[in-house]
């Protein structure tokens, strides 16, 4: 159960951040808040970065398939263009948007808009992701949601990538990532570096054999 300011006074805007790892329910929580705003007859607009095309071109869809219509944007400043006469703005997968996003959100909140942002707080290497740290700093309210560690059942906050490579954005997340707690994440990283070292060793052996 999350508590948030439900009533919206037109003269007062603010910023809310919902963050966490993959499979932590960020989008579900964003959709829940936006649906309540719609019930309250507020004008709601939802945005997501154009890069996130996993499920649908235009809908914000959570893993449990609740959907709200959204506008895909290539840059954060595009949001200002669509935000005329809006009471509440939702932004999903905000980690993929550019560094202009905190300024855009601040500008909207100063104009009286309630801005609700959902995004990954950390990338797969456990580093703060894109504009999220700054958004968390300037927000009135931050909710950190958690997944369940698939290895031990504890509360998970890391999105561990199960495939090789260091590219930051990999689509088709369900096969490529697993939520892990800190202890299991550290263990998984250790296992991976051990496997890489063994691979390198094997390559060396093969090269020697070739000579
Ligand atoms: Zn664990």
Image: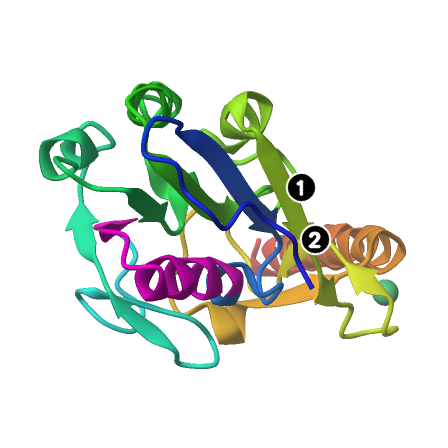
Residues in magenta?
29-50
N-term mark: 2 or 1: 1
Q: Toward the viewer: 55 or 29?
A: 29
State the separation of the CA atoms marked 2 and 1.
Answer: 6 Å
Name the side, left or right, on which 120 lies relative to 169. Answer: right
Q: Which mark is residue 90?
A: none
Between 125 and 103, the one lying in front of the other is 103
- Ligand 1 within 8 Å of disc 1? The answer is no
Residue denoted by label 1: 126
Q: Residue at x 52, y 68 (%)?
A: 176
In the rendered image, residue 136, in percent from the top left (x then y), is placed at: 57, 30
Q: Percent x, y for residue 144? A: 67, 48
Q: Which mark is residue 158?
A: 2
Query: Residue 50: x, y in percent?
Result: 21, 50
Q: Confirm if mark 2 falls within 8 A of ligand 1.
A: no
Task: Please say whether residue 167 is visible from this viewpoint.
Answer: no
Left or right, 123 with reference to 130: right
151 shown above or below 146? below
Query: Does the rendering let one see residue 11?
Result: yes
Element carrying mark 2: strand
- Looking at this view, is 77 or 112 the one in front? 112
The answer to whether the residues at label 2 and label 1 have Cβ atoms under 8 Å apart is yes
> Is residue 41 rendered magenta in the image?
yes
Does residue 60 show up magenta in the picture? no
In the rendered image, which quarter contains the N terminus?
bottom right
Residue at image position (41%, 42%) is 8
Query: Splitting the image into 4 quarters, where does residue 14 fall?
Result: top left
Q: Secondary structure at mark 1?
A: loop
Q: Is residue 12 left or right of residue 199?
A: left
């Amino acid at each position: 159960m999350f508590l948030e300011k439900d009533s919206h006074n037109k003269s007062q805007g603010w910023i809310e951040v919902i963050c966490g790892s993959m499979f932590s329910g960020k989008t579900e929580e964003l959709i829940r808040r936006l649906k309540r705003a719609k019930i309250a007859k507020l004008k709601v607009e939802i945005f997501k970065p154009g890069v996130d095309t996993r499920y649908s071109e235009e809908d914000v869809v959570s893993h449990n398939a609740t959907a709200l219509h959204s506008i895909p944007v290539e840059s954060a400043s595009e949001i200002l263009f669509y935000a005329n006469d809006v009471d509440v703005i939702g932004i999903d997968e905000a980690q993929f948007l550019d560094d202009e996003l905190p300024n855009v959100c601040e500008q909207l909140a100063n104009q009286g808009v309630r801005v609700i942002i959902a995004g990954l707080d950390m990338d797969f290497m456990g580093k703060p992701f894109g504009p999220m740290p700054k958004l968390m700093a300037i927000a009135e309210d931050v909710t950190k949601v958690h997944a369940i560690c698939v290895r031990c059942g504890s509360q998970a906050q890391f999105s561990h990538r199960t495939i090789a490579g260091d590219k930051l954005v990999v689509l088709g997340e369900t096969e490529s990532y697993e939520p892990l707690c800190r202890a299991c994440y550290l263990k998984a990283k250790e296992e991976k570096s051990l496997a890489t070292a063994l691979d390198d060793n094997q390559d060396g052996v093969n090269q020697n054999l070739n000579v």
